[in-house]
Image (tube, rainbow, N blue to C red):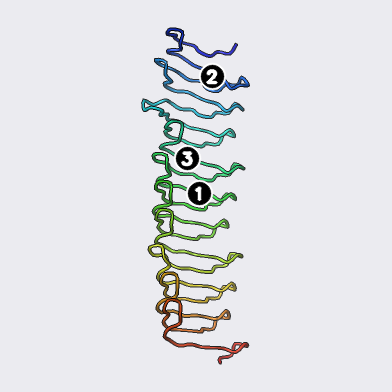
Amino acid sequence: GKLEFDGVFTHGDHWQGRVLTYHADGTLHVDGLIAAGQSSGSFKSYHQNGNLFVEGRYETVEGGVTGKRYRSDGKLEFNGTFRHGDPWNGRLLTYYADGNRCFDGLVVSGQATGLGKEYNENGRVSFEGQYENGEWHGAGREYRSDGKLEFDGDFKRGARWNGRRWTYYDDGALHFEVLVDSGQVNGPGKEYYSNRQVAFEGQCLNGKPHGAGKEYRSDGKVEFDGDFKRGVQWQGRRWTYYDDGALH
């Protein structure tokens, strides 16, 4: 007794009017309009639990729909233009299995492009910045799961390219604080012991001390002050100490 069509038939086929389809269990699936035998105008589709799945409008482009799509729990998944059923241009949101947000950003031609955010499973932001063709590209920031900043600068095709980078010990204490240039650690930087004392401060090239710099013991006493060459103490002044910290 459920209504399937209300409108005009042509040669026994639905031609113009309202069409309703149902899931196997009898719950409403799609409620929409047709014109000249084709889906047209506004429509709504539903999950089997009765929650709204898609509300939108058919466009003239083949397979095109403009509207919103929702998860079965009611959370918004996409707001924009679909192409052949897939998100094409608009705002996309994805979620972890527990319902926590995973991604919130813009898509262009089906790829993440423009501003977006990624989240850890604990709900903290893991990345915020620019995307291009589904990759981190342009200005952005990357974070650890505890919220500490790992990189702030420019990305190139998903790689850290130019900016400032931090690394940490397992307990969250700062380990390295360096600059990245063209994907390499170049320029001034600092390395820390796990007790938070400075271990090295100076210039780096391709990830190694190179140029003016200082090395320290874990108690803060300076061990070397001068120039490094590809990670090796090259020219300068050096100090050594007894086990009790006295100068040797």
In the displayed image of the protein, which residue is found farthest to the top? 11
Residue 81 drawn above or below residue 166? above
Q: Residue at x 43, y 32 (%)?
A: 82
User: Which of the numbered marks, if any, corresponds to residue 21?
Assistant: 2
Which badge, 2 or 3, comes first in the chain's sequence? 2
Residue 245 drawn above or below residue 197? below
Q: Amino acid at mark 2?
A: Thr
Q: Amino acid at mark 3?
A: Leu
The Cα–Cα distance between marks 1 and 2, rounded to whole angstroms, is: 37 Å
Residue 174 drawn above or below residue 146? below
Per the image, the residue denoted by label 1 is 118
Which badge, 1 or 3, comes first in the chain's sequence? 3
Within-10-Å neighbours for mark 3: few <14, some 14–19, many 20+: many
* Figure quadrant of residue 154: bottom left
Whether tag 1 and tag 2 are in contact, CB under 8 A, the answer is no
Per the image, the residue denoted by label 3 is 92
What is the quadrant of the C terminus in the image?
Answer: bottom right
As helix, strand or loop, the secondary structure at mark 1 comes to strand
87 sits to left or right of 53: left
Badge nearest the viewer, 2 or 3: 2
> Where does residue 102 sit, x and y in percent of width and height?
54, 46
Within-10-Å neighbours for mark 2: few <14, some 14–19, many 20+: some
122 sits to left or right of 114: right
Whether tag 1 and tag 3 are in contact, CB under 8 A, the answer is no
